[in-house]
């Protein structure tokens, strides 16, 4: 469902009806006479739709986490808020950037339109910016040939879809100004080579049984899930073009299953 497009259509309809009544229909009835329901209803909804459209398009937009690819940072069922303007002002619906603000940085959690199907929104962590060499071999992430430091923090267990219990190891990792947690499953293969699809600029990547190395092209970003062995990310479907960026995730505002998560910042 293209919610921004639906909101724009409703905004045009209700706003158009308000203007029609103000400059045409109102003059055809006495000042005391109320307008017909098909005029009053759109007029009453117009201010609300205008406010919601403005907030979601330019300031903050809510999203729900549908999968476990970002565990332990984000859990299934988390409702999050995304800053829409931090990476630039974009026109709603077409997502065209008209003003630069900040560039995405390594370590930030970003929402973007899935390159293979732009009608879907994905959320992952940025691990590579334009010009970076990103490698992942033997469960070790390296940026520009420098291994990212991993601090072991014990084990982590969670329930995957189908009621499968997953036991993984938790590590602390840092990229740029961001410190966060990741999960690594020692029993899972480093890469599912068979799952790598053809994607634009695929020639920038080299794969083998132990992992990959990719050079991030200009105007693109490389993303990975914090749940490293249970994430469909740039390793498999390629780079995230700048035009696909939606915004930066910054807060959990609700979770029906764990109220203690409300208000947590996303690191």
Image (tube, rainbow, N blue to C red):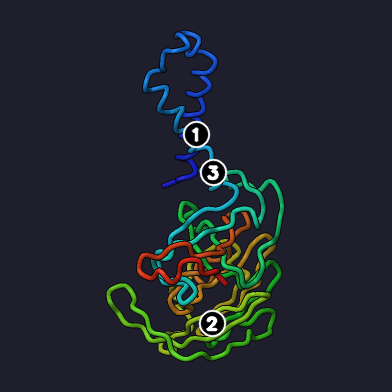
Q: Quadrant of residue 189?
A: bottom left
Residue that protrudes farthest toward the front in the picture: 32
Q: In this view, does 130 lie above or below 227?
A: above
Question: Front-most of 258 and 10?
Answer: 258
Point 70% across, 59% down: residue: 102
Report the number of discs.
3
Crowd tier of the residue under label 1, counting other residues whose Cα lies within 10 Å: few below 14, some 14–19, many 20 or above = many
Q: Cα distance, mark 1 to mark 2? A: 49 Å
Q: For this view, does 256 lie left or right of residue 71?
A: left
Point 59% across, 76% down: residue: 206
Nearest to the eye among marks 3 and 1: give it.
1
Question: Front-most of 255 and 170?
Answer: 255
Residue underneath mark 3: 93
Instruction: Mark 1 and mark 2 in contact? Answer it, CB < 8 Å.
Output: no
Q: Which mark is first along the chain, 2 or 1? A: 1
Point 61% across, 58% down: residue: 241
Nearest to the eye among marks 3 and 2: give it.
3
Picture disc at residue 211: 2
Tag 1 secondary structure = helix
Q: Which mark is first along the chain, 1 or 3? A: 1
Residue underneath mark 1: 11
Q: Is residue 6 above or below residue 117?
A: above
Q: For this view, does 215 lie left or right of residue 13?
A: right
Residue 226: % across, % down = 51, 76
């Amino acid at each position: 469902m293209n919610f921004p497009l639906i909101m724009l259509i409703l905004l045009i309809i209700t706003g158009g009806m308000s203007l029609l009544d103000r400059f045409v229909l109102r003059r055809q009835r006495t000042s005391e006479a109320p307008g017909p329901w098909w005029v009053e209803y759109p007029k009453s909804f117009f201010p609300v739709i205008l406010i919601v459209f403005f907030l979601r398009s330019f300031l903050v937009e809510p999203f729900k986490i549908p999968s476990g690819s970002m565990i332990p940072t984000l859990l299934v069922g988390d409702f999050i808020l995304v800053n829409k303007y931090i990476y630039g002002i974009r026109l709603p619906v077409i997502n065209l950037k008209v003003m630069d603000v900040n560039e995405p940085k390594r370590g930030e959690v970003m929402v973007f339109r899935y390159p293979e199907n732009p009608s879907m929104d994905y959320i992952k962590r940025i691990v590579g910016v334009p010009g970076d060499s990103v490698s992942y071999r033997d469960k070790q992430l390296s940026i520009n040939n420098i291994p990212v430091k991993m601090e072991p923090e014990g084990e982590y267990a969670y329930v995957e879809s189908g009621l499968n219990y997953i036991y993984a190891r938790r590590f602390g990792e840092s990229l740029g100004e961001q410190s966060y947690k990741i999960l690594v499953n020692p029993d899972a293969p480093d890469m599912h080579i068979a799952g790598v699809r053809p994607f634009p600029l695929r020639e920038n990547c080299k794969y083998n049984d132990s992992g990959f190395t990719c050079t991030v092209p200009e105007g693109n970003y490389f993303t990975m899930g914090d749940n490293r062995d249970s994430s469909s990310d740039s390793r498999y479907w390629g780079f995230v073009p700048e035009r696909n960026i939606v915004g930066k995730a910054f807060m959990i505002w609700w979770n029906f299953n764990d109220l203690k998560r409300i208000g947590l910042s996303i690191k």
